[in-house]
Amino acid sequence: MLKKRFRVDRCSCNSVKFRSKKGQITVFIILGILLLLALALVILFRKEIFVFKPGELIPTEKGKVETFVSSCITEIGDDALFLAGLQGGYIEMPAEMLRDGSQHLKMSPFNVVPYWVRGETLNIPSLDYIKNEIDDRIELELRNCLLGKEAFEEAYDIIEKSDISADTEIVDTKVIFNVRWDLEVRNKAGDVITSLVDHLAESPIKLKRVYETARQIVEREITDLKLEYLTQDLIALEHPNVPAAGMELGCSKKTWKADEVKAALKDMLRINVRELKIEGTEFVEFPEELPYYQNHYVWDIGEMPNDVSVAFNFDNTYPFSFYVTPQSNGMMKSGMQGGSDILSFLCLQIWKFTYDVSYPVLVRVRDETTGYNFQMAFTVHLVKNMPNRELAESRSPSFFVDTITDEDYCQNSNTVMNAFAYELIENEQTGVYWREPLEDVAISFTCLKYRCEIGETKYNFGGSGHVAGLTTNFPYCVGGILRGEKEGYKEDWERVVTKPGEKIDLDLVPVFKFPAEGLKVVKHELITGAEGLLVGGEEELEADETIMIKLINKKDGEVFHNIEWASSPELRNEENREIMEGSEVEFLGKTDFEYEVEVYLFNEEEMKGGYKGTWTVDWEALSQGKEIVFHVLEGDFSDDNELFDFMVNLDEHSKIVPLPKIN
């Protein structure tokens, strides 16, 4: 029994085991079928998505609207960044800055660049200010931009549920435009497609990086005065057309026209300012053969990003304030000798000029990764050849009002003043005095760089009697110059503070122009005999001899009128005769005047003789004369001691030769 049961149990066990394997197969089959069904559904679903048109799905419609909004934000933001770069951080230039020409550099009738620093005054817009201006521009223009897009209007209607609120982020590597604007978008059937609240756009422009570079340049300029020192160096180079200080042997006075010196200095600045580089930025290095530029034109202002470049620029069209002293009537002249009568025979020309110069520099900082330009400007100041921002601002508050022309300034005349002109003939030595009204005198008024032609004096103007003058409106000026000019007269001028009813008298002294070709110099040999010093007969100058003549008339102990004339062998050549025929020497006229006379005779640079004395010019003889003959002594000096002794006593030696004579 036991054995049988045992078999049955084994058979039962085998049977159960068999059924278990069969169940596993069944489960596997069912799972496989389910997997195939799921795969088929996925394929079918993907196929259905693929065949749907984008416009038939809500997510795609939302994306379209988001794209429209983002494109508008990007467009407005990029325009704002462009204006900020063009206008030194200002997207909308402040009205007071536009009106005041001293606060900006005018690049065109439509574009100005603000001065970030003028004198010592800083005016740099902060990054927060620029950020707020970008926000304002987006909030102002986004609505019109979006609703003005034709494709958007044709497909959608928009319902605004909030105002536009922009919050721009200016980070180191880009600019992020965040905008909150609650919009409900409907299709033309009136169905709500989507709602949008937060919008985002970006610009790759590294505004923060170029702005901080520009700011660092300006702040270092304030402390380093780099451009001032470069300007000082250019003047100190003693360019032939921009004299500073120097000396030269010779008896021909050196002269420069102030206007030509100004133009030459502007050209030097235009060429050299643009060579200035910033250490650490992108630039082409100077070659080894230009060590001066390597040492002076690479400016280390601290750590700089290496993906920006910096360019400095001054142009001849920029406003430029320039004043040089000493000068007279627009002419700069060297001084004769060293200030000592004893050494006057050395004929040493000495000059020392001081310059007041103010001008703007345009600075462009470029992001080389995007090509974005950011520009601003600052002013440069030299006072009496020295860098000085503090004094420059107080001395020249209106240097940069370049938007006003002479015509504009002169038209703004509302102060009535009176100008009178007289012919003055006076000689303190002889007691001659004559002062009478003088008509047809051209009256002009100068204030800084502006010049106004006022009019001409009229005799008995307005029934005023025995006077010649004019009464008219003058423009306001705290330190103007009223000048009177008439052909045949030495001009006169007076400093004037514009005040109602002011009366200004101008005294013009008559002059007489004698032809330079009528001046003649003859020499006499100095002979030392038993009876003392003797002179030989008249001799003509030799072909290689040079003459310099100097005549000075003094009034109240000061030089009132001076005449200088030089005759070199070149001028006496036949080729240059026309030059001599066209030149004149201007004497005081209509009465006798006394002159201190100095005449020097040279053979190249070697002193050979001279004359020194006092000569009263006879007016009647001068007005009728054709020739003036000057007499000089010529010595044969064995050494410098003999020459020195001769020249020290030249005024005594000269008494043995005739005075100048008018024929």
Image (cartoon, helix red, strand yellow):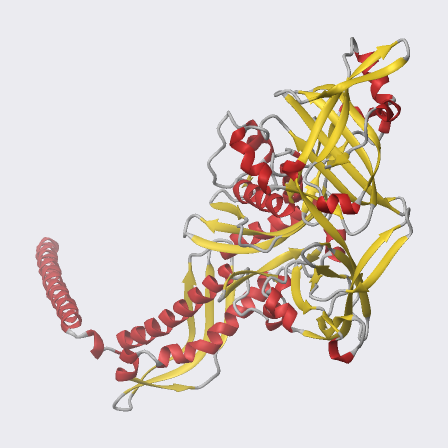
Of the pair 576 and 145, the residue shown nearer to us: 576
Q: Quadrant of residue 578?
A: top right
Q: For the C terminus, which image quadrant?
A: top right
Tell me what residue is drawn at x 33 percent, y 74 percent.
68
Residue 342 pos. (x, y %): 86, 25
Specify whether 535 is left or right of 84.
Answer: right
Q: Position of residue 26 (x, y in %)?
A: 10, 63
Q: Is residue 581 above or below residue 177?
A: above
Image position of 371 with respect to 301: above or below: below
Q: Is residue 86 visible?
A: yes
Tell me where residue 103 appears, x and y as whole percent: 63, 62
Judge left or right: residue 39 versus residue 538.
Answer: left
Instruction: Report the residue that reaches farthest toward the bottom.
Output: 190
463 w.r.t. 222: above or below: below
Is residue 254 visible in the rendered image? The answer is no
> Relative to the observer, which residue lies in front, 34 or 10?
34
